[in-house]
Image (cartoon, rainbow, N blue to C red):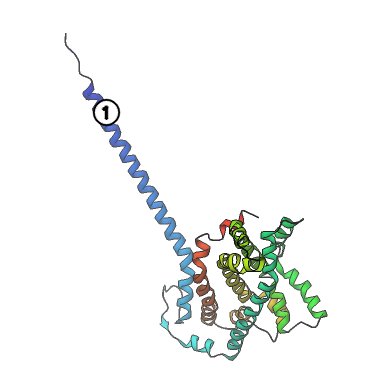
Amino acid sequence: MSIINISGPRREKSAVAQVRAGTQAGASRLAKGIGLALLLIALGLFILGPLITLFMWAFSKAWFYPALLPQAWTLSWWQQILLNDEIGHSIILSFTISPVVTLLSAVICLPAAYAFARYDFPGRRTFLVSLFATNAFPKMGLYITMAGLLYAFGLMDTFWGVVVVQLLSTIVIMTWIPSAAFAAVPRQLEEAARDVGAGLWTTFWKVTLPMALPGILVALILAFLASLDEAQGTFLVGSPDYITMPVQMYTLVSNYPQQAAAVFSIVLSIPSFVLLLLVRRYIIGGALAAGFHLH
């Protein structure tokens, strides 16, 4: 009796199937890699493309279609912008108003942030969520209403009128982020400090505040940037004497060549870029995320 050996053909078929499966998996990984690379390139062009174009405009003397690069380069636009008295006054004014707005916002909002994080009172969630009402609708209508009140109190076209209208841009930031930072502080640490004899103020200054300080610093910097970039309310309340950098940008875009607007855009973005670099590890690292779920 002869025995037919069928294990050989089966093994060959199995090997062929494995090779095909491996080839298909490799092709699938290659296609995913190519798709991801194309997506990253498109995203990079979308983000970096306008910035590169802005920098080239800031140094261009002549740039006409269809040339991909400027035909001539110059630094004269930088000289015109940086040596312009009106623009210099706007820069000084912006860096005078924004710290005042940030400080007042901290004085007003930080106690409220601590109360939201540490106390359970009727309407707590409603009050906390209602803070977003200032950002839920176009602000121009709110600015116009405020302008009527400021006019009644003689604060139109004044330093403090601009400060008041810019506070609206910082309330949410200076309440929501510090509230999350305070909520992220373990209560066990505060209770341990109280158990060894520390009072309320000592516990706050020695335990709670140091642990919440990174979140508070992030809120301070973001509030400063919100004040520095606010334009609509400042234009409505502060014109014609209190023209800050963002408001001055409208004048440059309307009355100056594109190169001048590009230079001023770079100057306006430098503080934001530098300050965001300082807080990036707290924002990207999720240092504040632990406190948000408690709300």
Q: Which residue is mark 1?
A: 13
Q: Position of residue 66 (x, y in %)?
A: 44, 72
Identify the residue at the far left of this view: 1
Asked whether 169 or 36 is in front, the reply is 169
Q: Is residue 288 above or below residue 84?
A: above
Identify the residue at the far top of this view: 1
Q: Residues within 10 Å of mark 1 (few under 14, many from 20)?
A: few
Q: Is residue 214 above or below residue 60?
A: above
* Mark 1 secondary-structure assignment: helix
Number of numbered callouts drawn? 1
Q: Position of residue 275 (x, y in %)?
A: 53, 73
Looking at the rendered image, the quarter that the C terminus falls into is: bottom right
Residue 195: image quadrant is: bottom right
Residue 218: image quadrant is: bottom right
Asked whether 112 or 227 is in front, the reply is 112
Identify the residue at the far right of this view: 152
Looking at the rendered image, the quarter that the N terminus falls into is: top left
Q: Position of residue 212 (x, y in %)?
A: 58, 65
Asked whether 101 or 13 is in front, the reply is 101
Asked whether 69 or 99 is in front, the reply is 99
Q: Is residue 87 above or below residue 37?
A: below
The residue depicted at 62 percent of the width and 83 percent of the height is 96
Q: Is residue 255 above or below residue 291?
A: below
The residue depicted at 63 percent of the width and 61 percent of the height is 194
The residue depicted at 57 percent of the width and 68 percent of the height is 210
Q: Position of residue 73 (x, y in %)?
A: 42, 83
Amino acid type at circle 1 is Lys
Quick check: 278 left or right of 115?
left
